[in-house]
Every structure is written in C-alpha cells, then in structure tokens.
Image (cartoon, rainbow, N blue to C red):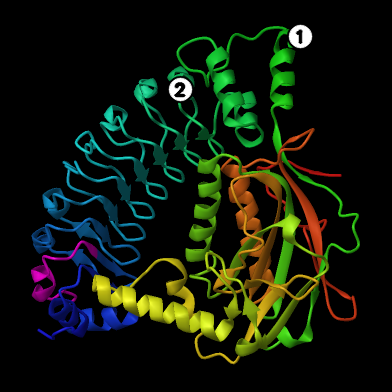
Amino acid sequence: MESWEEIEQAADDGRHELHLNGDVISSKLERNEMKLPNKLFELVALNYLEISDTSLIEIPDDMAKLTNLINLALHRNSIEKVGDFFNHLPKLKFFDMSFNKLTSLPEQLNLGTVHTLNLSNNELASLGDLSGAVNLSILHIEHNELEELPTGLVTLKHLLEVHASNNLINTLPDDLHTFPALKLFDVSENKLKEVPHSMSQCQRLKTLKLEGNPLKDNRLRKMTTQCNTRAILEYIAKQSGGDGGKKGKKGKKGKNQPVKEEAEENVRRIVITPNTDDEKRVICDASVKDVRPYLCCTVIKNLDLSDETVFKNFLSLQTKLHENECDMRTRATIATHNATGLKFPLVFKASHVGQTVIHALGKKKQCNATTLIQNLKDERDALKQKKKRQPKTGLYKFIELVDGQEMIASVRNQDGDVISLPPITNGEKTKIGASVGDVFIEISSPVSIAQCKYVMEELIKKMFQQNFNSDMEGDEGLWIEPIRVVDENEDLRIVYPSKIDIDFSNIPVKRL
C-alpha cells in the first residue's frame, strides 16, 4: 500500500494532531482501494484527528487503536457506515461525523466521555440509545430523516443544546421536563402537530425553536415565528390538558382576545430605523477595485452584549459564519466595531502592505501590514514547533490569504486610522466588548456584492433567531440603521438594508 507523507511526517515528529483534507487525500484513497493506511492507526499519540472533504466511504474498526483521541472530526466525506470503534475511545470528547451519508449507527452508543456529538446532515432514520452518553452537552442531529428523538435523551443531566431541525419528527416525549440543564431546543422544520405541556416546565430553557411545524394550534403556530421563547412557554403552560399545543375548548371570541393581545405584545421583530446623519457613510476608493472591491455595512442600534455569555455567543456566531457561509474567509469577511470609536465618513481603500499601519486586535502596539503578517507567520511556526502540530485557530488560519500580496484593503476612520484589515484582523481601537451600544458591521468580499449581502443577511437572521436584542424603547428585537457606501464621486454603490432587503418569511419587519 502507498505510504502517505502526511502520516509518515506525523509519526516522525511524534505529533498529537493530524489533518487529512481535500482532493489530495481523495486521490490517495482511490489508489488504495478507498482504504486508510494501517500506519495511521499506529499514531497512538494523536489526540486530534481530522479527515474531511474526502471521498472516504468507511471507517475501519482499527480506529479504536487511537486511544488518546480527544477530538475526532470526520465531516464532509462520503461515509456510509461505521462500526462501534468510538465506543472504545476512552478520552473522546468531540466527535463530528456531519455531512456524510450515514443511514444507521450501532444500537448502543456508549459515548460516556463525549461532550459534543455532531451527526447532522446525514441520512439517519433512527439513532441508538444515548442514555450512556452521560457527559453529553451538545447534540447536533439536524438535517436527517429522524421520526423521533433518540432514546435516553431526557436522562442526560448535562445536556445543554439539542439541534434537531429539518427532520421528520412527529412527536415529542411527555417527560421533557426532566431535562435539568437544557438551554436550547431546536425542533424547527419537522412534522410536529402538538407540543407536550411538559415543555413549559423546562426551567432553564432560553431558546425554543418550533417554527416550520404543522401545529394544530394556529395561535401557537403563529407565535413560533413572531414571539420570544418566554412568551411561547407561557402560552403552552396556560393551555388545558396534557399537551400545551392542543387547543383548549372553544369559547366566545372575547375569551380568546386577551391571549391574542398578549401574543401581540410579545412579538419580537426587526426594526429598520432611518439614518438621518449624512456623514454616517463609507467612501469606497477606486484603489480597491483590483484588491477587494465589494463592501456592505450596517449598524445594529444599542446591541445588548452586556452579559458575558451573550458577548461570547456573538463572537462564536461570527466564527461559524467565517467557517461556513464565508468559506474560511475566502468569499467574505465579517468585521464588527464599537461605533463610538468611529469617525465618519469612513474610507475603504487599498494601499501597499508596507505603508498600511494598524494597531491589530489583541496586539500591544501598531505596525505595518508586512510586519504583522511576518509576526503572525513566526508565531505560527513557533507554535507548530512547540506543539508538533499545525495551529488551526486564531489568525493563523488566514495568513495565507494575504501572504505575498503587495496591496491590501483596509477600512479607515476619517482621520486615516486603519480600523480593519480584511480578511485577517480588526483594529484594537474599535473592538467591541461586553457592553450595550451601537455595533457597526462591515462585510467585505473579493467575489461579489451579492456575497456581502448574503453573509450580512445570514448574520442578522441568526442574531435574531438566537435572541440577540437591541436595548431600545418600543419593539423588542433588533434595531438596524442603514449605511450607504458611495464611490469617490459620492455616487451610491449600495445602501444596506434597502427597502427590498431583510425580507424574511418568518421574521416580522417594521420599517420606520
């Protein structure tokens, strides 16, 4: 069997981390009868193994020999079946088999050490008993063909999040109230007709997603797209009988009216408020045309990030968008700023890397882009040498996107200070924190303005769905202020949102 240099190098260096990705690995699999080399399963020092974006069809039981694995990522392959090797990995905490072709799993899933399990985007019609996954905190089973939740789920004391949208689930267990720690429960886009009354007794539940189900209760179905979780749970709790989703006895119209009024009062929405400040705009210089020509911006008014957990969730959301919708920042990059540190009009221009100076996020002092890129490369290489593995976090992942370029795009304050250097970093001076205030969002792209708008809409939609809120008098939800991007002659290039933007089918929008 052909030797793989990636595996040989990992063995020689005694590495703890190994990444096997892409077409190069697929070609090697095809030459090896679609089998992984036996040498891989001799790397017992590995604690992180990623095999992704390949044509791999099957995982051999020899994977169980890698007993030091903590993180096993087998996403975006063509895996059709697996044995029970993962039941024999005593240190495994993160197990990702998303975006494969799995139709079934072993009946017994003894994942006693696993914290995060991702089985999303497969073809699973059923799952085995999960009661043995006693440390499970996050479960992703969305985009499958499941008709019910896995057995044993309600017994898991540490379970915080269940992502089960886009399945065929037609019923929920009656003992949902036994979830002691559940904070997020997403069963949207399924086949549910009723919701158990016990759902309202999940005391720590912060996010409940039921939209896209054929619920019999018309009022509840409407509330799933317009009201916050608290209002939905209160409504379920008030319904008579064992199922909160069932309608109560029909009464006179007047008796139903208070519930309707309460529902209307609790409607969350996106509010688009006019921009009355002519200076609050971005001037796009002609120099970006051949570097990074597309930019889209907006402001979220008085965004409440004062809770440290909410703030961290906002950063995490951006990271996920960068990895997926932005395709690892190759198609677009998100930058967020504390708007109080901005001096309008902003300028989007390109300049030589040696003449572009920025005080980069998290750095002690300012330097030019050439020095910043070289410093990041040196830090990456030093970390690689120290830990015997390729760093896959922070800015190190994106250095190659700009390394070797003579020109680089930047967004600048009116006084010339660089506040962002896409696609690698923001500036320290305008960084956001755990507080309440206006947040300026910029999406830049080398691809198209449509890509910018797509990422912006995904960001806003996910912020709304994850219950981020503007601290404003009046409607609860997100308040958004449009920002114009103009050229050097002040001719309009884009305003976002315009009158035709932010048109979501299941999110109410008010335009002031």
| Horizontal and vertical percent position of residue 316 | 49, 53
User: Dot 2: within a 10 Å radius of its alpha carbon, few (fewer than 14), some, or many (20 or more) residues?
Assistant: some
| Horizontal and vertical percent position of residue 80 | 25, 61
| Horizontal and vertical percent position of residue 457 | 66, 57
Quadrant in which the C terminus appears: top right
Q: Residue furthest front?
A: 365
User: Dot 1: within a 10 Å radius of its alpha carbon, few (fewer than 14), some, or many (20 or more) residues?
Assistant: few
Residue placed most toward the observer, 198 or 144: 198
User: What residue sits right under mark 1 in the picture?
Assistant: 254
For the residues marked 1 and 2, what is the alpha-carbon distance in whole angstroms? 31 Å
**Segment tinted magenta in the rendering:** 34-48
What residue is at 61 percent from the left and 24 percent from the top?
231
* Residue 428 vertical position relative to residue 156 in the rendered view, above or below: below
SS at circle 2 = loop
What residue is at 17 percent from the left and 51 percent from the top?
91
What residue is at 49 percent from the left and 58 percent from the top?
320
**Residue 55 visible in the current orientation:** no
User: What residue sits right under mark 2 in the picture?
Assistant: 203
- Which amino acid lies under the numbered mark 2 shown in the image of this protein? Gln
Residue 42 colored in magenta in the image: yes
Apparent side of residue 89 relative to residue 431 in the rendered image (left or right): left
**Which of the 4 image quadrants contains residue 72?**
bottom left
